[in-house]
Amino acid sequence: MLDIAVSYNRYKFLGNEFLTWLWFMIENDQTFFTKIDIECTALEIGDKISFENRKKESLEVVSIKGDHAGWEEGKLSLQKGSLVTELNLLYHSGPGKWRFSLKGENLGIGNLKTPEGGRVETKEDLEGAILEKIFLLDKAISFIQGLFRRFLKLRVSPQWQADSIPMMKEWINSTK
Amino acid sequence: MGLLSPSVTVARYAIQEKIDGPIIETVHNALCKQSFQEIENRSESKSLGWTSFETPFKPNFEDSSFLVGAYMVFALRIDKKTVPPKLLKKHYSLAVEKKLADTGREYLSRNEKEIIREHVLNNLLIRIPAVPDIYDVIWNYEESYAWFFSGTKAANEEFESLFLKSFKISAIRLFPYTEADLVANLSDSEQDLLQNLQPARFVS
């Protein structure tokens, strides 16, 4: 295994490519998500996408925010060579809804809001509340892990170059 | 923000090594040994250690209280005291003036000034209350993972360091490479491809 600090920096791009691919999948193949979670009814972009464009001597960072933001500007950013570095997502599964932000470079999960659990009114309720919250968090975390593993398998397969890249290029260039 | 907060930030860890000895007893002893120590009325500026999830301001690991179902649930507590620079400057200046008046001298050496500064700082640290930060930890030993409820680099580094010191096993943060290398179940040939992977180009 590579040194942790070296591998963190060396493979940052993989997390950003994952988020860029995820946005592409959200817009183009919602049925894919049921392969990870059979109860998933939708995965949507939430209220923020951040981008980074690393050029030889400069770093350009762009964020688009807003509940009903149009993401065309983001596509234009991709056309200039940016990758997604952070996505706010809405994950619908069964009757529940999860909202969270996902960072590409470390797959860190921020501002994760789960469906509401039962109230803690007595000391005896606490253990149940902890287990329920762990279950609800695990649902979103397992989903993210499942997505990233599917992406990894694709990323190291011949289909990445043959199919995914051309389709993503076409999608990126579909906004003028 | 802790486990039961409405909104949480989570860093995921792989804990792949196994504990040498009986698990619950070893973890219990390690939590007690590295439990949080108060620094109120003392001159230390920082203290960190494990504390209990339920009573973070009064660590208690008795009766296996850190076990919840299949999980070990506890917290990392980090207390810090910060002396405002202007407050330090005021008390330092007063102390230097007093020393000059007491000794009848016009100047103090650099070494004397440094001793006064340290003395003033220690006195202020004793009087200033510490500000606590509490970060919850969930550890599923059987499934070899842990969640640490903070996204800040400094808190995660303190967690990794105290975890290793306490339990003699490493908590490895899961980010793209470690996720791929340790837990994604890639085949040997896929691992080889991963090692040589270069960034993709989505623009012509």
Image (cartoon, rainbow, N blue to C red):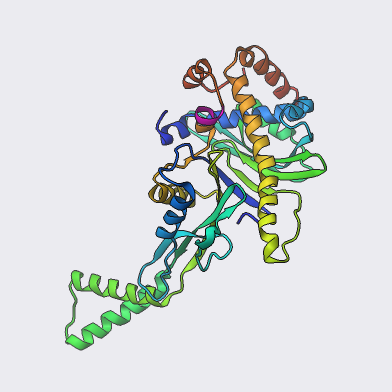
Residue B140 seen: yes
Q: Residue furthest right?
A: A95
Residue B170, given in percent of the width and then of the height, sits at 43, 41
Up-down relation of residue B191 to residue B154 (above or below) = above
Residue B201 seen: no
Residue at (60, 12) in percent of width and height: A158
- Magenta-drawn stretch contains B183: yes
State left or right for residue B7 relative to residue B173: right
Q: Nearer the viewer, residue B7 or B53?
A: B53
Residue at (46, 70) in percent of width and height: B130
* The N terminus of chain A lies in quadrant: top left
Residue A169, given in percent of the width and then of the height, sits at 68, 19
Residue A124: which quarter of the image? bottom right
* The C terminus of chain A lies in quadrant: top right
Up-down relation of residue A35 to residue A39 (above or below) = above
Residue A13, given in percent of the width and then of the height, sits at 54, 29
Bounds of the magenta span?
B180-184
Q: Nearer the viewer, residue B7 or A16?
A: B7
Q: Nearer the viewer, residue B2 or B118?
A: B2
Residue at (53, 28) in percent of width and height: B180
Residue at (42, 51) in percent of width and height: B162
Residue A35: which quarter of the image? top right
Residue B44, given in percent of the width and then of the height, sits at 36, 68
- Magenta-drawn stretch contains A119: no
Up-down relation of residue A62 to residue B79 (above or below) = above
Up-down relation of residue B145 to residue B121 (above or below) = above
